[in-house]
Amino acid sequence: MAFKLEIAESEEKKEKYEMLLPQIRALIKDESDLIANLGNICSALKYSFENFIWVGFYLKSKDNPQELVLGPFQGRVACTRISFGKGVCGKAAESKMTVIVENVEEFPGHIVCDPLSKSEIVIPVLKDGEVAAVLDIDSGDYSCFDVTDKKYLELMIEKIINIFPGK
Ligand code: SME
């Protein structure tokens, strides 16, 4: 059955996230396939926020535990592999901490995928204390992301962590 995403009309991102998070949980609750669920989460996020130009997951590579590999995403084509420690995604994976970049041009080692990207947030997905994936969101505006995005995106990951396989 088709799922109709309701997007808050408010300009307040807090209200958008508060409307979106329960819908994301509803969207994935009857499906066990990780890729299908991550694909829908990317779409729900991208189409809820007009200035999100790229939303995607990089998953921990099965061949190399120190490397991320491109997973489901919405947006322009992107680089497929990122080593831990490299770029914004690799820094988030290495530190196991969310990284907010207000201006990607000022981030040393930033990996350019979409030249229209101006700011970025990367949230690590930690399962049993280990990095299972990262969620990467790019915006076409500078300084798009702040503590509100961090709070709600980390909460979203916490609420959906059961869809990721354990060790
Ligand atoms: N900018 C990221 C690379 C991934 S793309 O933005 C989709 C980084 O520096 O890790």
Image: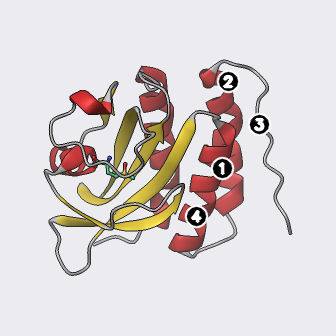
> Is the residue under label 3 in contact with that under label 2 (CB below 8 Å)?
no
For mark 2, what is the residue? 15
160 above or below 120? Answer: below
Q: Residue 24: horizontal and vertical position, in percent?
A: 65, 50
Q: Is residue 34 left or right of residue 10?
A: left
Mark 3–mark 1 Cα distance, whole angstroms, equals 9 Å
143 above or below 36? Answer: above
Mark 2 or mark 1, earlier in chain: 2
What is the secondary structure assignment of the residue under circle 4? Answer: helix
**Which quadrant is the C terminus positioned in?**
bottom left
Mark 4–mark 2 Cα distance, whole angstroms, equals 23 Å
What is the secondary structure assignment of the residue under circle 2? Answer: helix
> Looking at the rendered structure, which numbered label has been put on residue 44?
1
Give the camera-side residue of 122 and 23.
Answer: 122
Mark 4 or mark 3, earlier in chain: 3
Give the camera-side residue of 21 and 162.
Answer: 21
Mark 2 or mark 3, earlier in chain: 3
For mark 3, what is the residue? 7
Mark 3 belongs to which amino acid?
Ile
Mark 4 or mark 1, earlier in chain: 4
Q: Residue 60: horizontal and vertical position, in percent?
A: 28, 67
Name the front one of labels 2 and 1.
Answer: 1
Mark 2–mark 3 Cα distance, whole angstroms, equals 10 Å
Color theme of the render: secondary structure
For mark 4, what is the residue? 39
The image quadrant that residue 36 belongs to is: bottom right
Does residue 81 appear in this view?
yes
Q: Residue 40: horizontal and vertical position, in percent?
A: 63, 60
Q: Residue 107: horizontal and vertical position, in percent?
A: 21, 32
> Is the residue under label 1 in contact with that under label 2 (CB below 8 Å)?
no
